[in-house]
């Protein structure tokens, strides 16, 4: 396997509706910005990997429309794996280069959720249609069940979950691409309307229109393109049962723990709290950041709820988490996972909008389905783990 690095990142502004741009125009904007960031042209790109979730766009096969905008005449692959689509697209592009097949590959994800009349019925289709869907179970209610399970088992409070929202919204104020840029207090979060108890409005993600693109390059080309690439140390993914009812304990995220241990073994991470400087986690609901921090080894089980409240996960804390504002502030669903990788890469390049001091190793994560899929990538300013 060849060494691979991220050498360019491009994003559009994310908003509830981007009526000013068509699907291919958003795609082209992100790709152009990524190529400009890398300092290369379309002629330097060998292939494209494109990700989107068709139902959220409200049109069939938007890749057919956007393929010419991404890279006309280039090899082209489409990826669609639910909420993990963005990061799975990044992993596929990485593997295109690591395999030796290509030297420069662009991963691009575009989502126009504003094209859809209502995203929630689409989310509900992720749930088993025979035993569970008729009950109205969807992404929000499943997250609410995770919250009540964590509260019952570990004593997590609504105030502690609200602190996650306060932290992410504070971070998003420094991100010019973020969809929601609004300063909140704990009281603001707790007094916002209940969406699915115990989750309030400001503890739930928006739905966003926008696009993101990332340029991957082989070691030889990466050295030629830029002095500060983000080297891919490892990637990992996992799938779990389709049935929510099969989860033995919703207070913990066992499948993510397994994926995390696989990733750490590949990268040589012995202690994630020591070896990883920043995490961009796929947390569309406050409780899920808490569960993810615990599953990935940044906190003991039952202790993750304290981290935001104590300032640990703020950008200037000991374990900065979602310094971009995360999914609570920007969620172009099929592209969201690739945004996580783009933001993690910018951190280790030293070029993030809300830069964490001394960030050398960053983690990107995405989940999808009915808590079913996880994808992880670890990037570093160095080719190997080590200071």
Image (cartoon, rainbow, N blue to C red):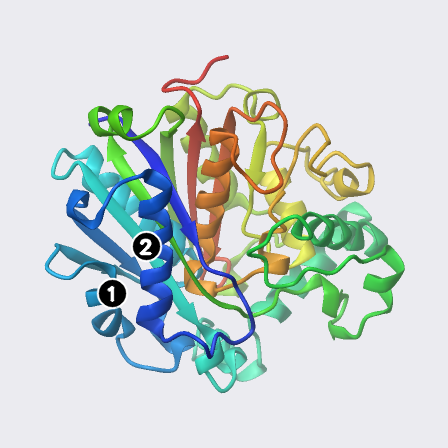
Asked where in the image residue 181 lies, by quadrant, the reply is bottom right
Residue under numbered circle 1: 69
Secondary structure, mark 2, is helix
62 above or below 75? below
Give whichever of discs 2 and 1 has the lower sequence position: 2
Query: Label 2, label 1: how many angstroms apart (C-alpha)?
Result: 9 Å
Going by the picture, which residue comes out furthest to the bottom?
Answer: 117
Sort mark 2 into few (<14), some (14-19) or many (20+) by Cα contacts within 10 Å: many
Q: Residue at x 55, y 70 (%)?
A: 207
Horizontally, residue 166 falls left or right of residue 79, namely right
Task: Give the label on residue 31, or none.
Answer: 2
Asked where in the image residue 298 lies, by quadrant, the reply is top right
Using the rendered image of the protein, determine whether residue 137 is visible from the camera's viewpoint: yes
Horizontally, residue 223 falls left or right of residue 259, namely left
Q: Where is residue 120 in the image (x, y as percent from the top left)?
A: 54, 78
Q: Where is residue 212 in the image (x, y as percent from the top left)?
A: 41, 55
Q: Position of residue 94 (x, y in %)?
A: 27, 40
362 above or below 339? above
Q: Residue at x 65, y 63 (%)?
A: 180
Secondary structure, mark 1, is helix
Is 149 or 376 nearer to us in this picture?
A: 376
Is 109 or 265 nearer to us in this picture?
A: 109
Q: Do the residues labelled 2 and 1 touch (CB within 8 Å)?
A: yes
Q: Position of residue 87 (x, y in %)?
A: 39, 50
Is 382 or 197 nearer to us in this picture?
A: 382
């Amino acid at each position: 396997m060849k060494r691979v690095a991220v050498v360019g990142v491009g994003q559009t502004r994310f908003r509830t509706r981007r009526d000013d741009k068509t699907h291919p125009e958003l795609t082209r904007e992100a790709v152009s910005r990524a190529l400009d960031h890398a300092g290369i042209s379309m002629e330097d790109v060998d292939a494209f990997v494109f990700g989107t979730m068709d139902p959220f766009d409200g049109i069939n096969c938007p890749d057919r429309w956007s393929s010419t905008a991404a890279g006309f005449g280039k090899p082209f692959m489409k990826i669609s794996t639910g909420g993990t689509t963005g990061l799975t697209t990044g992993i596929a592009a990485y593997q295109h280069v690591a395999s030796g097949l290509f030297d420069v590959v662009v991963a691009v994800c575009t989502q126009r959720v504003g094209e859809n009349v209502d995203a929630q019925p689409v989310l509900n289709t992720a749930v088993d249609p025979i035993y569970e869907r008729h009950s109205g179970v969807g992404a929000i209610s499943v997250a609410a069940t995770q919250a009540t399970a964590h509260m019952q088992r570990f004593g997590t409070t609504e105030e502690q979950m609200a602190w996650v929202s306060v932290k992410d919204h504070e971070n998003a104020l420094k991100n010019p691409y973020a969809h929601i840029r609004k300063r909140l207090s704990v009281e603001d979060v707790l007094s916002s309307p209940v969406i699915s108890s115990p989750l309030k409005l400001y503890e739930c993600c928006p739905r966003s229109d926008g696009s993101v693109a990332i340029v991957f390059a082989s070691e030889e080309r990466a050295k030629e393109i830029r002095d500060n690439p983000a080297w891919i140390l490892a990637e990992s993914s996992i799938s779990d049962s389709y049935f929510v009812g099969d989860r033995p304990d919703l207070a913990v995220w066992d499948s993510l723990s397994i994926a995390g241990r696989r990733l750490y073994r590949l990268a040589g991470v012995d202690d994630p709290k020591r070896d990883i400087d920043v995490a961009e986690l796929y947390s569309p609901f406050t409780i899920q950041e808490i569960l993810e921090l615990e599953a990935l080894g940044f906190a003991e089980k039952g202790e993750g709820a304290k981290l935001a409240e104590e300032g640990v996960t703020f950008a200037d804390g000991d374990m900065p988490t979602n310094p971009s504002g995360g999914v609570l502030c920007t969620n172009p669903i099929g592209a969201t996972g690739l945004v996580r990788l783009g933001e993690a890469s910018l951190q280790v390049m030293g070029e993030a909008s809300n830069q964490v001091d001394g960030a050398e190793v960053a983690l990107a994560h995405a989940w999808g389905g009915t808590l079913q899929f996880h994808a992880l990538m670890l990037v570093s300013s160095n080719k190997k783990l080590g200071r």
